[in-house]
Amino acid sequence: MQDALLKTSRIKWWEPVVWLLALLAPWLFPHHALIINEIAIVALFAVSLDLVLGYSGIVSLGHASFLGFGAYTAALFAKWIHPDPLIGLVVGTASACVLGALCSATILRGSDLTRLMVTLGMALILFELANKFDGLTGGSDGLQGVVMGPVLGRFEFDLMGQVSASYSIAVLLVLFFLARRIVHSPFGATLMAVRDNRLRAMAIGVPVSARLAVVYTIAAGVAGAAGALMAQTTGFASLDVFALERSADVMLILVIGGVGWLYGGVIGAVVFKLMHDVISSITPQYWTFWMGLFLVVLVMVGRERLFKPWTWMRRT
Amino acid sequence: MTILFDGIAYGMLLFILAVGLSVTMGLMNFINLAHGAFAMVGGYLTVVLMQRFEVPFLVCLPLAFVGTALLGAVLERTLYRPMYRKPHLDQVLFSIGLAFMAVASVDYFVGSQQQIMQLPEWLKGRTELGTETPWELGMGHYRLFIIAVCAALTLGLQYVLSATRFGSRLRASVDDPRVAAGMGIHVNVVFAMTFAVGSGLAGLGGALGAEVLGLDPTFPLKFMVYFLIVVAVGGTSSITGPLLAALLLGVADVAGKYYVPKLGAFIVYSLMLAILMWRPQGLFVRKGGK
Amino acid sequence: MTKRAFIVSAVAASLLLTAGSAMAQDKFKIGLILPMTGPFASTGKQIEAAARLYMAQNGDTVGGKKVELIVKDDTSAPDVTKRIAQELVVNDKVNVLAGFGLTPLALATAPIATQSKTPLVVMAAATSSITEASPFIIRTSFTLPQASVSMADWAPNNGIKKVVTLVSDYGPGIDAEKYFKDRLLLNGGQVIDSLRVPMRNPDFAPFLQKVRDLKPDAMFVFVPSGAGSALMKQFAERGMDKAGIKLIGTGDITDDDILNGMGEVAVGVVTSHHYSTSHNSAVNKKFVAAFEKANAGLRPNFMAVGGYDGMRVIYEAAKATKGGSGEALLAAMKGQIFESPRGPMFIDAQTRDVVHNIYIRKVEKVNGQLYNQEFETLKDVKDPGKTK
């Protein structure tokens, strides 16, 4: 029994291979360094959502609140205080954590729909706030003029985007394994218990509210890190980081890849972004149609079967 | 007073648009984020009929209802039915996919500009009562029309729910589908009809709202948030719940933007947040309801 | 093989497929980044159509090289715009970047233009500060301050002294409000109140009601092109014209793209803008006819003319530099002076911004269709919003 449980948390043979490939990707495919960077950031964001959605059962349509908050704090920090990326990353993550801790009070009660709306409302309110305080945030024009210092004092952010991509993937790697550690720990087990049956978890003595607050804070921090990466690698922050589209997109990405196993966020990010890019260059105006079609087919056929083309002919 | 009137009109419109969603979610436990797309279809149907085929406005309204209801019925049978058993997240994915397809298709066939409705003359006027007093009430005729139609529909819906056999079957299916089926109620038929009517109402709302809210291919995504707010605050177990929620939101939004324009958009979201924190199940839920 | 291995190899395969675009050297590449989806899709459509029209009319060879137009959708998200611009510059090695439907999109891409020394032609965005964001930016659209101060110059001479401004709460709107207000005050007028409408606003009713209650001579409006019709309807519905309040604003509210559909309610509205489809010149008539023919009767609007003129600037500069790039191409763009469908215009060599006539127009019915009829011209209006 113990063996089976331990098995799921052990590092599989293919994981180091994939991660090595990922780290090398910006150098193997220099022309795609930019989209690799974007994928890495979105993947990190999706993984953070997986922590709350997949492992704790908190439905959130406003996760972009933390992405945006991390982005703006990192951008403001770099602009006004110190341009070092790593310090900025820590600042972005920490401030998002604080926001997450504050907001966690809102997600404790109510049904799925309630939480959906509460999280959504939070993101929209932050959007309006960022718009109003345009002296600080640049309003709808966005916060411009963020010039980053070199990473670790040596690697300048270049036009090709290779440094950015490597930086983002490295951060993704670190935080991913942190998340992994969390979900495969006793803490993580209690989270899954709460997700599956809150009443029962309470009955066996799991402090549900405390657990949810903690995981929400952590996930907020990770999302904030993704936001900080975004601001740092692109050199600005704009209002749409808080928009509904961001939160909705990341939820789509996570569900495409599969909730509840951290790689779902990564796979979803890769698939979604690549599909978007490819289809968009074929039909810049109507790519949403094909994306929608893909989603519908995905759900109807079932995710498992879609990724195994050899099962398409077989009827379950 | 005019503000109150405008708010009520806006709220009634929101209600008609959202009631279908509320019933679907309560009845079939299905999160249908493509609901806005049905509204858009109704709106575009009306615009096309009026512009290309010169059908009078009043005739377009029931046509919009019927057309969208038919579309809803067909989609329910073919696409939605297998989805009922799927987890909520898959339903979300599916309905968003449908919404995307709808948005892109409309963009392709009709174009991305705002569609402009030409109202018949008798709806264009305005009546002013008690001008220059604090109780000044200016009523646009079109908004009066909206209020009248929506009020009639609400009464009609309430009647159907409480006084007809179909209504009681529906209520039984909402409370407990298994027992209802066991009692001989064709739950599937109830579902289909309800979905069709809900979509039809959305279509009607889209047609009515095109004048006030604007109509373009991004309509479903823009307004989905508002529909969800109405359903979340109003609860999914009655009709009066969403009605009151919609009215509240409509008035709050309009009044907020008038009295405190700096905080215009805040008001709605903050209000919703406050309400949901205070009563997480929604404002108007029966004891023991879902 | 297992599911995961399949996924990994599929991903690698797709990456390889999309890798390595052909590095043809003897081409003059134009990277056109537009919002083709989302709320500003009509802008993208108009500009793309205009760009293709220009290419069709002037051939696809310039300065001895073949012209390649690469069109990309940025979904109006600035980080996407920036990434696409970066990819175009680094992978496709474009000679010039163009398009940019919104201010934040242009601002986000400015550093790329500077870093890679690629000229950037703004065909749509209208905030003053854009040209100051990079020395490589040229604009062929217009700026809101140009249109706003023109209106603020015209209004007091025509019986409008007390005004309430109503703008959308974002960059261009705030620009419009500020410049209109300052100029009107200078001309002896008065701005009773300044209202800002949130961008995602579904209902103008409360704002219009407030304006009505304040009883000004006129209401000055700026909203982005799509929202103009809704505003117009509500204006009439609220009986504001009967209450003696005139509707003035920048031409975005009577956008030619949707003007015809607005109906009677739009007749008589006075706006200030740099382009009207009914502009009475031979060049414009030719442009409109060709545009409508190539696009199933779609009427070109000011976005289209920004795109058309942008292509002209690019082509002429390419001819002068024999398909060059970088600083040489930029230098050839500055100072160009020519006749555009909008009227005469030139690219100021100092500010790299557009200088053109602003027309005061009124909506009138001509041959059963609605047009913005120009009746007054303010010549060679420079952008008042430049701080440098």
Image (cartoon, coloured by chain):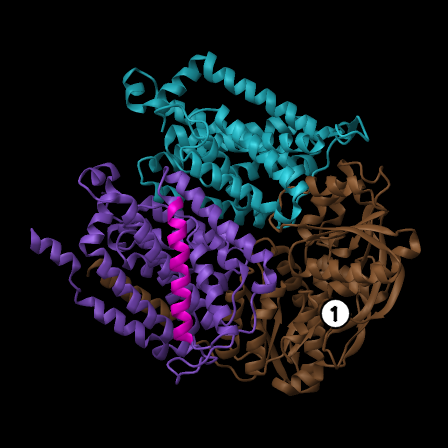
Chain colours: A purple, B cyan, C brown
Q: Magenta region's main secondary structure?
A: helix
Position in image of residue B42 (x %, y %): 58, 35
Position in image of residue C199 (x %, y %): 62, 51
Q: Bounds of the magenta span?
A: A85-106
In screen coordinates, is C107 left or right of A64?
right
Position in image of residue C226 (x %, y %): 67, 50
Give the chain letter at badge 1: C
Residue B200 visible in this rendered orientation of the protein: no
Q: Is residue A89 magenta?
A: yes
Residue annotated with mark 1:
C385
Where is C272 relative to C356, above or below?
Answer: above
Tell me what residue is drawn at x 46 percent, y 64 percent: A71
In screen coordinates, is C347 left or right of B70?
right
The kind of residue tagged 1 is Gly
Foreground residue among C277 and C186? C186
Image quarter (top left, top right, bottom left or bottom right) of the N terminus of chain C: bottom left
Q: Is residue C338 magenta?
A: no
Position in image of residue A253 (x %, y %): 38, 55
- Name the secondary structure under disc 1: loop
Image quarter (top left, top right, bottom left or bottom right) of the C terminus of chain C: bottom right
Foreground residue among A280 and C291? A280
Q: Quadrant of residue A198?
A: top left
